[in-house]
Image (spheres, helix red, strand yellow):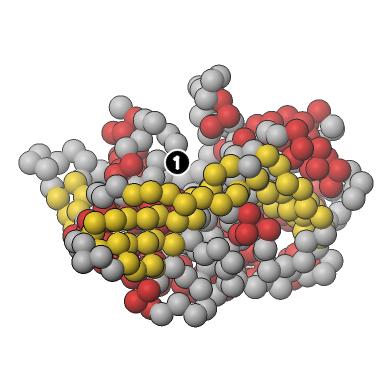
């Protein structure tokens, strides 16, 4: 049942004219974020019906919201949320408008005081885009920004695997191939690819040992030739990729190669957000995860042709990080950071970690 609803509700088709993900078919419902409870309901818990032992995978901002409420923060007065459709681009206008609206709303509710932003993961990319597009808003309305587990320079090799073979984010009820179909049509997933213009020390990569014994490494960085870039390998691997539309009898199969429109959009948005001019009046704080094996390399052997990368076994090379975002990406935002806190936790549980909560309270109470 979970896989059926995932396909029906989450699969979409990218519309390059509107730069929006539309429902896959006319019968598919259009979905959007839950915005009730001043935006907090959509970020508190990703599935309120789930309890232990997998609560950590879905609770999301629940712990942070509860801690802030225990310290006197009030929903709709001093506490607001900004849920968003994470399939869409980080620069999708409805998302940026929702964030700006909540910033102005919070400021108005508190006598014109500047606000504090708290982001997790891709939420930092949305903020980077708003900074680039509306610097004046941050000068007048934002005082502090706490970025937790932020993929400032992109995610690690998990995102490369997402395009090649699919990755279900550890959710055992979602098939990896189904997640791959969603990702190929989702601009936000392209925006998580390793930043091209960043001077990586350990750039995420795909290593291919061909049947003739030669080895080719596909990576990224200012000096990487286009035919040695990870997107070249991904594009070639996906040329033969297909997907089957749900609820079609006989099964309706469609070609689904790399979505070039999503890729082109991500090129523009990542360039826009590579070095945003965060005003000096805004203080940035960083919380990043450590102590987790974080994939930075995929090693394939015995490959005859690029399409084999969709099904062949691989070995992993790991670095330190939160299991999703390498330290190098999380710690180098290309903006000044006043203070940072490393936390031994993975990408999701970092939101519930004691060190994260202590650091956050120190920031909001202006103790640092």
Task: Give the residue displayed 32% in from the left and 37% down from the top.
Answer: 175
Local crowd size for mark 1, using a 10 Å CA cut-off: few (<14), some (14–19), many (≥20): few
Q: Is residue 19 above or below residue 177?
A: below
Query: Which residue ends up furthest to the right in the rendered image?
Result: 367
Q: Quadrant of residue 10?
A: top left
| x 46%, y 45%: residue | 32
Q: Residue furthest left?
A: 250
Query: Which is nearer the eye, 285 or 327?
Result: 327
Which sits in the foreground, 317 or 179?
A: 317
Task: Give how far across and how far down residue 192 sits, in percent.
Answer: 49, 59
* x, y percent for residue 306: 24, 63
Q: Using residue 2 as the reference point, say whether residue 139 is left or right of it.
A: right
Residue named by callout 1: 169
Apparent side of residue 143 relative to residue 344 in the rendered image (left or right)? right
Instruction: Give the SS element for disc 1.
Output: loop
Query: Horizontal and vertical percent for residue 220?
Result: 47, 70
Q: What is the x, y in percent for residue 178? A: 30, 43
């Amino acid at each position: 049942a979970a896989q059926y609803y995932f396909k029906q509700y989450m699969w979409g088709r990218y519309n390059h004219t509107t730069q929006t993900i539309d429902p896959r078919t006319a019968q598919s419902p259009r979905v959007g974020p839950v915005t009730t409870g001043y935006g907090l309901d959509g970020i508190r818990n990703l599935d309120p019906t789930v309890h232990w032992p997998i609560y950590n995978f879905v609770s999301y901002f629940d712990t942070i919201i509860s801690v802030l409420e225990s310290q006197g923060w009030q929903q709709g007065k001093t506490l607001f949320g900004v849920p968003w459709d994470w399939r869409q681009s980080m620069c999708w206008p409805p998302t940026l408008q929702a964030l700006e609206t909540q910033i102005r709303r919070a400021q108005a509710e508190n006598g014109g005081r500047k606000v504090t932003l708290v982001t997790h993961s891709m939420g930092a990319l949305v903020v980077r885009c708003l900074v680039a597009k509306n610097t004046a808003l941050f000068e007048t309305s934002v005082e502090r920004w706490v970025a937790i587990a932020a993929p400032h320079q992109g995610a690690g090799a998990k995102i490369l695997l997402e395009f090649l073979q699919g990755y279900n984010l550890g959710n055992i009820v979602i098939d990896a191939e189904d997640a791959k179909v969603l990702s190929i049509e989702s601009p936000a997933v392209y925006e998580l690819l390793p930043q091209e213009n960043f001077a990586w020390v350990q750039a995420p990569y795909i290593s291919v040992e061909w049947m003739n014994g030669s080895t080719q490494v596909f990576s990224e960085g200012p000096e990487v030739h286009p035919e040695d870039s990870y997107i070249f390998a991904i594009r070639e691997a996906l040329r033969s990729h297909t997907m089957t539309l749900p609820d079609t009898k006989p099964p309706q199969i469609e070609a689904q190669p790399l979505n070039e429109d999503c890729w082109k959009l991500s090129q523009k948005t990542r360039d826009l957000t590579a070095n945003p001019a965060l005003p000096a009046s805004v203080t940035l704080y960083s919380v990043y995860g450590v102590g987790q094996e974080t994939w930075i390399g995929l090693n394939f052997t015995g490959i005859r042709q690029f399409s084999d990368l969709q099904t062949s076994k691989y070995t992993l090379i790991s670095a330190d990080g939160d299991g999703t975002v390498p330290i190098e990406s999380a710690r180098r935002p290309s903006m000044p950071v006043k203070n940072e806190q490393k936390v031994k936790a993975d990408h999701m549980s970092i939101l519930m970690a004691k060190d994260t909560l202590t650091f956050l309270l120190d920031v909001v109470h202006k103790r640092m």
